[in-house]
Amino acid sequence: MQCRNRFMPTALMIVFISLSAPLAADQVKMNNGDVITGTVTKIEDGKVFIDPAYADEFSVDVAEVASIEAEQTFDVVLEDGSEKPAKFDHGEDGMQTLVIEGQPRSISMADVTLAVPPEPWYERTSKVEANLTWNSGNTDSQNNLIYADTQLRLGDHRHSGNLTFARDKTGDVYTKKQDLLNYSYNYIFADPWYLGATATYERDPIKDLDHRYQVGVIIGRDIINTDTTFLSINGGVGYSEEQYGGVTESGATGLWDLRYTQDFRDGAFAFFHNHNISQHFYGEDNLIFKSNTGFSFDIIEDVYATISLRYDYETEPPEGNENEDTTLAVGVGARF
């Protein structure tokens, strides 16, 4: 018993040292023999990005790197245009070893043009924004705009939906009662290309728009899709039915859509611009353009301020209505 007790302090010390030892980190071997430890986050634009435990993320030129050893699997694009999921392992004689489906392959680091973590199979972002204005005294008015948006990704399938409720009132008279619902589905069949479908419902009885339904099929491309920038365009054809003042018209419709966001300062500040165009090939061949352009600023955690300019234009609006409708909205939003 006494012998066993004599070994207890030593055993406890070994366990303590084992638990307190740092976890294995990725390694970047430089051509000059230096070794940088940390987490390799990506290879992009001729640079290797490293996030060490002792400092903020920084980058080194790929041309100065001999080889990399990293724990995680990356989506790797090589100089010849091929793309493979692979792990990085140190090679010999200044070569980089890529482990592709369990098989090692020696290449030059210069042949690696891009390496980024695989996109998650499930990803969702949602937000709600409230823009409210009240005036009293010489002018008695209320302007309320509620906007909600959800983006959902399941592998190669993307779903997007948004709701807009706008109410403008001067005195006791409403000047706008717009309800707008948009939904789109994308299937990424050959990244960055996608096929999809879209559906829209809108009503505004103040403009005599009893309803407008629109469905269509689209083909699109993600022009830019990085951590800080997203630009996607699509076009297609569809069918639309609208009822103005009790008169119904319907027919073929041409569709166009653009979405753009640009983040700055790690997403604390962002610029966005979205617009869509519908060309109706029936009735008076009405062209409808809707856009939303603005900025958002983080306030605290997932709460942010937003300022945006919403612009609607129709070449053939209902009789008694203007071609243009512009709304400057200032409010707050929350992500969840």
Image (cartoon, helix red, strand yellow):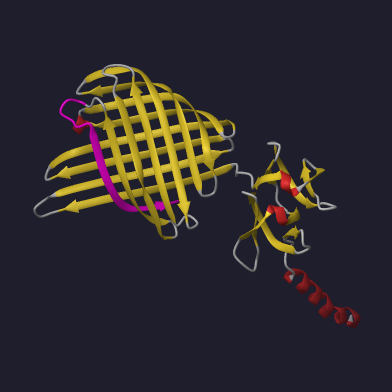
121 part of magenta stretch: no
Q: Residue furthest left?
A: 138
What residue is drawn where x is 73% and y is 44%? 111
Region of the chain picked out in magenta, as a range: 318-336
In-front residue for pair 258/29: 29
Position in image of residue 91 (x %, y %): 82, 51
So how many labels did they put on this image? 0
In-front residue for pair 189/256: 256
Position in image of residue 314 (x %, y %): 27, 29
Position in image of residue 212 (x %, y %): 30, 26
Left or right: residue 302 versus residue 109 is left
Left or right: residue 306 versus residue 2 is left
What residue is drawn where x is 47% and y is 26%? 218
What residue is drawn where x is 33% and y is 18%? 281
What residue is drawn where x is 76% and y is 73%? 16
In-front residue for pair 169/80: 80
Q: Main secondary structure of the magenta part?
A: strand
Left or right: residue 194 versus residue 140 is right
In-front residue for pair 229/321: 229
Locate residue 38: give its quadrant. Answer: bottom right
Q: Which quarter of the rendered picture does the N terminus lie within? A: bottom right
Locate residue 318: give its quadrant. Answer: top left
Position in image of residue 126 (x %, y %): 44, 46
Q: Is residue 38 above or below residue 218?
A: below
